[in-house]
Amino acid sequence: MLLAIDIGNSHTVVGLFKDDLLVGQWRFKSERDRTDDELAIRYHALFSMIGFDTKELDGIILASVVPTLQTAWVSYCRKYLSANLERPLMVVSAESVKEIIQIKTEYPAEVGADRLVNAIAAWNTYRCNLVIIDFGTAITFDCVSAGCEYLGGAILPGIAISLDALSSRTAKLPRIDINDGPEKVIGTNTVQAMKSGILHGYGALVDGMTHKIRLEMGCSESDFKVIATGGMAHLIAPYAQSINKVDPMLTLQGLRFLHSQAGNR
């Protein structure tokens, strides 16, 4: 069985695969002061709840954008989970995936591991020109050519950051719940106006950005897909006509694919 770990700035998502089937998934806040022993207490309890014995584990792959947490996770995996691994713990980096995807940016090592994993996972599924939009702490646009080249992308503040800024930097704007969308684009009260601004506004941003990216990539609409992932992708997708698919499991599936490919090299 394979343990796939995606460590983001806001949340850490852990998936347990039996062959190609995701049999367990957990999502926690990324608390940067966690130790390897604290991780062991938490995750061994969760494994126990689904009847999983860590002796069944034969592979671990990890992608992280939080160096301090990566250190704790690597230590936890090596201390508590590595006894029966067929191959050493795999930590995703630009160097580790260079045989799978060509990274065309000026400084390949700067590209976040999660962005590379998403790019590889989406290309492996669709095999065309792609934009992958990850709605996380930051919103990232990652551009991949039909020839599996990572071209670069764009980064902007995430939805939660924008909502926090609105309520903390203004005197009269409240904190709002955007799980229920606005009744219409033109809000007739403060809450509805804020919901419209966030949901319709980010939806229009996605449509505008993806249109410009497609033109810059020089590809037709028929050979171009927009894939959305991340915790808030499902909230924006109804307001962005350009999104072709929402895939919340994209990163975990990408990690599974990368681990399988590493075993073939």
Image (tube, rainbow, N blue to C red):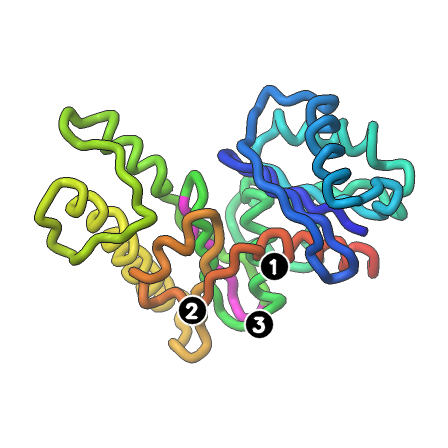
User: What residue lies at 84% left-to-right and 42% top-to-bottom?
Assistant: 53
Residue 231 in the image: above or below residue 147: above
In screen coordinates, is 175 left or right of 232?
left
Tell me if mark 2 has few (under 14), some (14-19) or many (20+) residues whose alpha carbon lies within 10 angstroms of its own.
few
| Magenta-colored span | 139-147
For marks 1 and 3, give the CA distance. 10 Å
* Circle 2 residue: 244
Q: Main secondary structure of the magenta part?
A: strand
Q: Is residue 2 visible?
A: yes
User: What residue lies at 37% left-to-right and 60% top-to-bottom?
Assistant: 237
In screen coordinates, is 170 left or right of 50?
left
Total tally of numbered discs in the picture: 3
* Circle 1 residue: 120
208 or 134, nearer to the observer: 134
Three-letter code, disc 2: Asn
x and y, in percent, of residue 126 in the image: 56, 71
Labels 1 and 3 touching (C-beta < 8 A):
no
